[in-house]
Image (tube, helix red, strand yellow):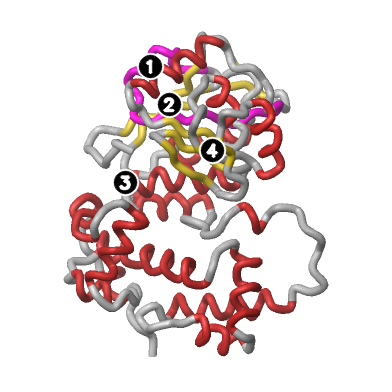
Amino acid sequence: MALRYAPTPARIALVAFPGVRAFDVSVITEVWGVDRTDRGVPPFDLRRIAADPAPVPLRGGLSLTPDRTLAWLNRADLIVVPGLDDHLTPAPAPVLEALRRAHARSTPIAALCGGAFTLAQAGLLDGRRAVTHWNLTDLLRTHHPRVTVVPDALFLHDDNIWTSAGTAAGIDLCLHLVRTTHGAEAAAAIARSMVTAPFRTGTQAQFIEHPTPHTDRDADTLAAVRAYALTHLAEPHTVAGLAARAGMSPRSFARHFQATTGTTPLRWLITQRIAAAQKLLERTDLPLPEVARRTGFGSEITMRQHFATHLATSPRDYRLAFQHTPDQRGVDMARPHP
């Protein structure tokens, strides 16, 4: 994404037409339509866009009043398309054409849940990877066979287009877009006010319907192990060591861990270390080797490699882009616990 923190508000366009989901409209509005500048969140200019100024009916007796027409998309830094109540609802032709023009201008476009069907109608997902709710993957494949449907991601990015899985994954994607353009602290502040996690690891696989397991007795044990790892990030951790703490064999531990979180212990740990490093880079002036030590990467080189792989940037460039005024809170973050 080209969008970066700037003194002027980022311009976000919520595209609406009859049939879009009220929940997704609310999510987009909650993330970008609330003034949280007093909590360190940058200002946003969220506009409700429709083909004409008439109120857009939503399910449940609600309606959305547009404040701009499609011409405003020329000014948008980011366009967000809500999901649909009926996933085969045809979008108005002017909306589809406006989305195609926006993509041709390299404007980032994000679709929540069934919003992928709208982008597919516009031809924007042809030959690209996309995700939608796990229960809609076959429907998307059937009606749009040129789309490469990924069955289990929470959200993904392909050629300046973002798509997400269902409902809560739309929140994940919106917070991710804030995080990648304005930093982890801004996303975390928004998440705290929404009483949700700043990010979730794993995939949709953990939510797809399966037979109910005989017991959830391992869930609390695994949660305790994750909590221990989070409070001891600076220490080296292995699957064998974490498995021993859980009282399981490494193979059994890895299997239960993935079933619970949707990811492997190693990937989960790397994600947590990157998140902790982001906060230290934003909040403190600690030297990079010290940031790497406190977050368990061991060396600046290793931390730099993981930042390149997962964030497509370096720790130094991340700090230059997102560092806030250091405060005492950052000094103790990720410090090894006794």
Q: Amino acid at mark 4?
A: Ala
Front residue of 110/56: it is 110
Where is residue 188 drawn, in percent x and y? Answer: 41, 55
At x 24%, y 60%, the residue is 315
**Observer-nearest residue: 6 or 163?**
163
Location of mark 2 (residue): 13
Give the spatial CA distance, label 3 vs label 2.
Answer: 17 Å
Q: Are marks 2 and 4 in contact (CB under 8 Å)?
A: no
Q: Looking at the picture, does residue 247 appear above or below residue 131?
A: below
Q: Is residue 43 visible?
A: yes
Q: Which residue is mark 1?
A: 72
The residue carrying mark 3 is 182
The quarter in which the N terminus is drawn is: top left
Task: Point out residue 122 in the picture as x, y percentages from the top left corner.
Answer: 52, 20
Nearest the viewer among 36 and 169 is 169
Q: Residue at x 20, y 69 (%)?
A: 288
- Seen at 58% across and 83% down, the residue is 250
Q: Secondary structure at mark 2?
A: strand
Queried whether the magenta region covers residue 75, the answer comes back as yes
Q: First in sequence, mark 2 or 4: give its number.
A: 2
Sequence-wise first label, 1 or 3: 1
> Magenta region: which residues?
66-86
- Residues at discs 1 and 3 in contact (Cβ within 8 Å): no
Give the amino acid at mark 3: His
Residues at discs 2 and 1 in contact (Cβ within 8 Å): yes
Q: Amino acid type of disc 2?
A: Ala
Q: Tell me which label, 3 or 2, sits earlier in the chain.
A: 2
Q: Earlier in the sequence, mark 1 or mark 4?
A: 1
